[in-house]
Image: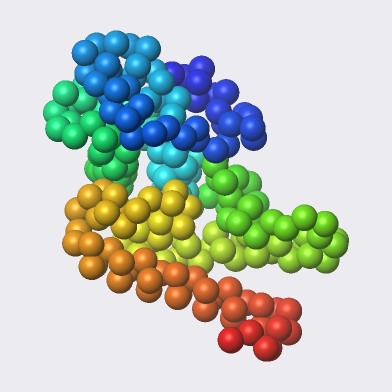
Amino acid sequence: MNEERTKGLSSKKNAQSPSISGEELGDLVSRAKKGRVEAFQELYRLYSRKILNYTYRLTGSREEAEDLTQDTFVLAYKKLTSLKENGKFQSWLFRIAQNNVYQKFRGTRPQFDSLDEIEAPESSAAQMLITPHRSPEERLLSGELEQVIEQVINQLPDKHKKVFILSAIHKLSYQEISEIVDRSLASVKSDIHRARVGVREKIKQYLREDHGMSNLH
C-alpha cells in the first residue's frame, strides 16, 4: 500500500479516483470478505485517493492525511466482515476515516498548513474554476480564488465543512453523506445549503472588494 500511496501522490494523472458500478463494487467487497487480498488491494486503489483527500481537507496536513488514510484501510480490512451491505462500502469507509480524525484530534482543532506550501492531494478548488483559453489576468484571478475558496472552506463550522466537502468535492449523495456523518437527511441537506450559501457569499465579497465586481448579486 505504501508504494501505491506514493505513486498516487506524485502523479497528477491519478488525481481522480477510478469509477466502479454498484454491481462490480458488491462483487469486489464480497471477494475481499472471503480473504482475497487482490480484491482488497483493488478497493484500496479505487478509494485511497478519496480518503486521502477527505482526511487532508479535515486536518490540513498531508502527513497526517497519509497516516490517517493508512489507518483507515487497515481498520477497514480488519472489520470488513462486519459490513452488512456491500454496496455501502464507500460511505462505511468514509465514516471510518472521519472517526479516525475525531480520535486523533479529540479536544483539539487541526492546524492547517500554509496554502503556499502544500497542495490538496486530489482536485484543488481552483480546478473547479478552470476554463480554457484564459488570459494572464484570468489565470491570476483563478489562482487567487483558489486560495480564497480553500480559506473559506477551512473557516466553515466543522459540521458544515464536513458535509460541504463530501457534497461539493467528492460528489456524494445526500443519503451517503447522511450515513457517513450519522445525521438525518434533512439536517444534512440544510447544512450543505448553508455551507454553499456561505462560501458563495464570501467569494462574492472578495470579488467585489478586491476586483471591483460590484454588479455581483
Q: Is residue 33 above or below residue 175?
A: above
Residue plotted at (41% across, 20% down): 42
- Viewed as shown, does residue 58 lie left or right of 30? right
| Residue 154 at x, y percent in the picture | 46, 60
- Camera-side residue of 16 and 69: 16
| Residue 140 at x, y percent in the picture | 77, 62
Q: Is residue 178 above or below residue 23?
A: below
Q: Is residue 192 above or below residue 169?
A: below
Q: Residue furthest right?
A: 136
- Viewed as shown, does residue 175 lie left or right of 12? left
Q: Do we see residue 165 in this rendering?
A: no
Residue plotted at (19% across, 62% down): 184
| Residue 89 at x, y percent in the picture | 28, 35
Q: Is residue 50 above or below residue 203?
A: above
- Camera-side residue of 26 and 37: 26
Q: Quadrant of residue 120?
A: top right
Q: Do we see residue 153 in this rendering?
A: yes
Residue plotted at (55% across, 59% down): 150
| Residue 13 at x, y percent in the picture | 64, 32
- Camera-side residue of 149 and 178: 178
Residue plotted at (73% across, 79% down): 211
Q: Quadrant of the N terminus?
A: top left
Q: Quadrant of the C terminus?
A: bottom right
